[in-house]
Amino acid sequence: MERTFIAIKPDGVQRKLIGEIIARFEKKGYKLVAMKYIVPKRELAAKHYEEHKGKGFYEGLLDFITSGPIVAMVWQGKGVIATARKMIGQTKPLESECGSIRGDFGIEVGRNIIHGSDSLDSAEREIGIWFSEEEIFDYESSLDNWVY
Ligand code: ABT
Ligand code: MG
């Protein structure tokens, strides 16, 4: 089953959006298979955002993402990588559709609330950075038959 890495960023946590965001993914039918609440070390954040190294916003981005607790998660289900990106919205909240998380709750690109992997490659890479195999729990659920 497909998996993606989702993180509620420090602004999402501070703005009390944890429950709202998790509820959206649960109600969609996706399964939470891993979760941790941490203040990321700069080294971890740098690995996560290595594709942006050298860009003007990179150091500020690392300052921001390491500035407080985040909720790091792995969500599982059919089409979850692309669908999570749709549920999240565009990088710039003001360009995001209403109904998406950033469209409903965000304004600034540097305060865009949530992260979601943008491809199968990045999902696998990011899950590997944030979680070990033993921290991921795939479990049988009686609801599965009603979602699929
Ligand atoms: P992430 O989910 O954080 O990866 O955002 P997304 O994939 O939608 O957008 P990308 B391009 O990966 O941006 C990563 C973070 O960098 C911030 N950013 C990006 C800026 O601050 N200025 C910019 O011009 C761009 C392109 C937004 C993203 N995260 N935050 N916070
Ligand atoms: Mg990205």
Image: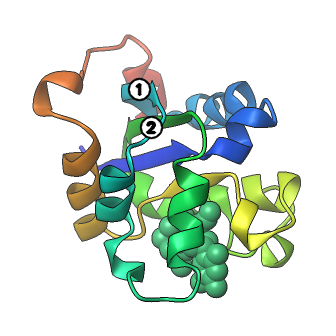
Report the residue that reaches farthest toward the left. Answer: 133
Q: Residues within 10 Å of mark 1 (few under 14, many from 20)?
A: some
Quarter location, residue 125:
bottom left
Q: Which of 106/25 is in front?
A: 106
How many residues crowd mark 2 within 10 Å: few (<14), some (14–19), many (20+)? many
- Tell me the quadrant of the picture where the N terminus can be found: top left
Is residue 21 left or right of 15 when viewed as pictured?
left
Q: Which mark is residue 72?
A: 2
Q: On the image, numbered disc 1 is attached to which residue? A: 36
Please tell me whether residue 52 is drawn above or below residue 122 in the rendered image: below
Residue 117 sits in which quadrant? bottom left
> Observer-nearest residue: 43 or 115?
43
Q: What's under tag 1, amino acid-wise?
A: Lys
Q: Earlier in the sequence, mark 2 or mark 1?
A: 1
| Residue 101: image location, x then y, percent | 74, 52
- The kind of residue tagged 2 is Ala
Q: Nearer the viewer, residue 137 or 27?
A: 137
Residue at mark 1: C-beta within 8 A of ligand 1: no
Q: Which mark is residue 127?
A: none
- Residues tagged 2 and 1 counted as in contact (Cβ below 8 A): yes
Separation of marks 2 and 1 at Cα, in angstroms: 5 Å
Say above or below: 113 vs 55. above
- Between 102 and 97, the residue placed more toward the observer is 102
Q: Please report the residue visible at 23 percent of the width from the left and 69 percent of the height from the top.
A: 121
Q: Residue at x 87, y 65 (%)?
A: 107
Give how far across and how far down residue 26 sits, in percent. Answer: 57, 29
